[in-house]
Amino acid sequence: MAGDTAHESRFPPPPEDDAFRADVRAWLEANLSPALRDKVLHHKRLNRDDYAGWHKQLGARGWSVPAWPKEYGGPG
């Protein structure tokens, strides 16, 4: 279709997607350290502690295993 770009869709996302995106953005703002953000944005090498710390934070939120039920450590 003329004028379409790669990020546009003919079908708008459901409203709950907007809420989820807002939740993810707020969580990242609160949990992504400036040092780690700087490394990622500037394509710097992440070390073992960077990965371990980040995955610990994701796990605490239930996002390291997104398809798992809440009782097994997932988001539900």
Image (cartoon, rainbow, N blue to C red):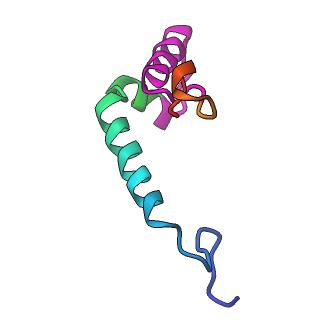
- Magenta residues span 40-65
Q: Nearer the viewer, residue 17 or 6?
A: 17
- Left or right relative to 30: residue 41: right
| Vertical position of residue 55 compared to residue 43: above or below | above
What residue is rendered at 43% in x and 27% in y?
61
Magenta-colored segment: predominant secondary structure: helix
What residue is rendered at 58% in x and 74% in y?
8
- Left or right relative to 16: residue 74: right
Task: Return the residue found at the far top.
Answer: 49
What residue is rendered at 36% in x and 46% in y?
23
Q: Position of residue 39 (x, y in %)?
A: 46, 27
Task: Return the residue found at the far front.
Answer: 71
What residue is rendered at 40% in x and 31% in y?
38
Q: Position of residue 71 (x, y in %)?
A: 53, 21
Q: Nearer the viewer, residue 23 or 1?
A: 23
Q: Is residue 3 magenta?
A: no
Q: Position of residue 60 (x, y in %)?
A: 43, 20
- Left or right relative to 66: residue 22: left
Task: Return the residue found at the far bottom.
Answer: 2
Task: Return the residue found at the far right.
Answer: 1
Q: Is residue 53 magenta?
A: yes
Which quarter of the rendered picture does the N terminus lie within? bottom right
| Vertical position of residue 21 compared to residue 65: above or below | below
Please tell me in which quadrant of the rendered image residue 69 appears: top right
Total marks shown come to 0
